[in-house]
Amino acid sequence: MVPALFIGHGSPYLAVTQNDYSAFLKDLGKHIKPKAIVIFSAHWESETLAITYTDDILDTVYDYYGFPEEMYQIKYPAKGSKIVAEIVEDRFEKAGIATRREVERGLDHGVWVALKHMYPEADIPVVAISVNAFLSPKEQYKIGEALKGLDEEDILVIGSGTTVHNFQWMNPRATSPVKEAVDFDNWIFEHVEKGDIDTLDQYRSLAPNAALAVPRAEHFVPLFIAMGSASNKTTKPNKINQSYEFGTMSNMCIEF
C-alpha cells in the first residue's frame, strides 16, 4: 500500500537544481515504490476532468517561456497506461463525475519536474489528470474520494501544485520565508490534519493571508483531491516538507 501525496512542484528550474528540496524528493521516491502514478496537475485546467489515455511514451511538455535553452532539452520519457486510465474512468463514472480521454497531451512541468527527482528512470507508468480550479474544496475532495482504494492497489495518487503561489509576492533575493506565507500554510495544515474539510471549504474567508497566498486556486486545489483520495482516514496526515522558494512560493508536501 502506498500513501497519497500532495507535492509542491516548485518552479521549472527545480528540474535542474540540486538543493535540499530536490534531495527530499529523491529520498521520497526511494521510499515509495508504486506500480503506477495518477497525478493531478495544476498546469492542466479543464472544466471536464481530462485523463491521458495511451500506452505510449508521453511527450515532455515545456509549458513555460523565457527560460535557458537547457530547460527545453529535458526529457522525462514515462509511458502512460490505458489500463490505469480505465480504472480511473470507471471510478469517476460510478461517482457521477464526467471525464474525457486525452490521447495527444503529454506531461507538463507540474508533472515531470517533481517526478524527475522522485523517479529519475521514468520507469513507472503515469496517468495525468486535469483540474477544474473553479470547483470548491469540498467538490475537489469528492473527486479524490472517487479514487479511494487506489493506494491499496499500489497506485500512487499525487496532487501536484503549490499552496502559496503568487508571482507578484515573490522575491528572488529572499533568503528566508515570509511570515505571512508560513502562517497561511500552518493554518491550512492544522485543518488538513484534523480532516476538517468544512473549515477548509471556507479558507478564503477564514485562513490568514488567503488572498495573497491563493490569488487563483489552480495550484491549491490538488491538495484537496489528494486529501480525499486517501483510504485510511483514521491515520493523521503527515507534513513531510515545508520549505519556500523566493520567500513565498511554498514547497509544502503532505502524505495522506
Image: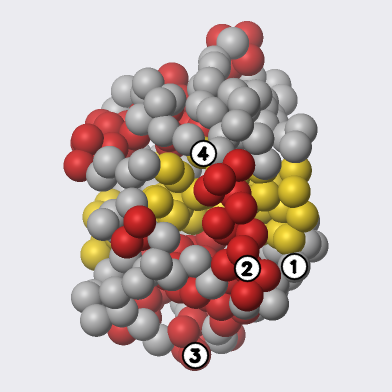
Percent coordinates x, y for residue 161 in the rendering: 52, 52
What residue type is disc 4 on? Val
Query: As rendered, which of 255 and 172 lies closer to the eye?
Result: 255
Q: Residue 79 lies in what quarter of the image?
A: top right
Q: Give the Cα separation between the discs numbered 1 and 4.
A: 20 Å
Within-10-Å neighbours for mark 3: few <14, some 14–19, many 20+: few
Task: Work out whether mark 2 precedes mark 4 in sequence or the reverse, and give the earlier one.
Answer: 2
Percent coordinates x, y for residue 53 in the rendering: 67, 41
Asked whether disc 2 touches disc 3, contact meaning CB atoms under 8 Å apart, the reply is no
- The answer to whether residue 21 is above or below residue 99 is above
Q: Which residue is mark 1?
A: 98
Describe the element under mark 1 as helix, strand or loop.
loop
Q: Which residue is mark 4?
A: 126
Q: Which mark is residue 127?
A: none
The nearer-to-camera label among 3 and 1 is 1
Residue 140 visible at all: no
Q: Which mark is residue 92?
A: 2
What residue type is disc 1 on? Ala
